[in-house]
Image: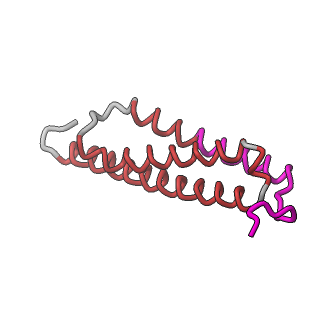
């Protein structure tokens, strides 16, 4: 059985280019969030790692998907679909990490404002 099927379904280059654009933009948002959060005035604590780790793994997966999509081999439907699955997994992980980061910051701020004498 030959793995190189000449009739393997292919992705239209315009569709692939749109996918690359979307992946690049959402990757930039993920990188922007982690950069902004790193500059947050709330001091980092060890428990913030539960938010940072999924964001970083999600960003790594998004970068991997972009690398796959930038290769001309991604015009093959199977490779394009694999890159999209990797990207979606990375996006979900990053989004979960962002949600956790927002919750942690909310709890930090509300805990400080609930203390007596806090301004």
Q: How is the image coloured?
A: secondary structure
Residue at the extreme front = 1
Quadrant where the C terminus sits is: top left
Q: Is residue 31 above or below residue 53?
A: above
Q: Position of residue 71 (x, y in %)?
A: 73, 43
Q: Position of residue 19 (x, y in %)?
A: 74, 51
Magenta-tinted stretch: 1-28
Q: Residue at x 74, y 63 (%)?
A: 3
Q: Nearer the viewer, residue 24 or 82?
A: 82
Q: Is residue 12 covered in magenta?
A: yes
Q: Residue at x 44, y 49 (%)?
A: 98
Quadrant where the N terminus sits is: bottom right
Residue 10 appears left or right of 44: right
Q: Quadrant of residue 63?
A: top right
Q: Residue at x 35, y 53 (%)?
A: 103
Residue at the extreme bottom = 1
Q: Position of residue 51 (x, y in %)?
A: 36, 49
Q: Is residue 87 covered in magenta?
A: no
Total of numbered circles in the picture?
0
Q: Position of residue 14 (x, y in %)?
A: 86, 50
Q: Nearer the viewer, residue 110 or 75?
A: 75
Q: Residue at x 65, y 57 (%)?
A: 84
Residue 78 appears left or right of 107: right
Residue 101 appears left or right of 73: left
């Amino acid at each position: 059985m030959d793995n190189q099927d000449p009739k393997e379904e292919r992705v239209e280059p315009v569709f692939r280019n749109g996918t690359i654009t979307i992946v690049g933009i959402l990757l930039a948002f993920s990188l922007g969030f982690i950069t902004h959060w790193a500059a947050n005035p709330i001091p980092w604590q060890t428990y913030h790692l539960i938010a940072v780790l999924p964001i970083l793994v999600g960003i790594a997966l998004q970068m991997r998907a972009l690398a796959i999509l930038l290769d001309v081999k991604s015009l093959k439907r199977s490779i394009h679909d694999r890159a999209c699955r990797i990207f979606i997994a990375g996006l979900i992980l990053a989004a979960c990490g962002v949600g956790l980061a927002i919750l942690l910051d909310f709890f930090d701020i509300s805990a400080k404002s609930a203390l007596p004498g806090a301004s």
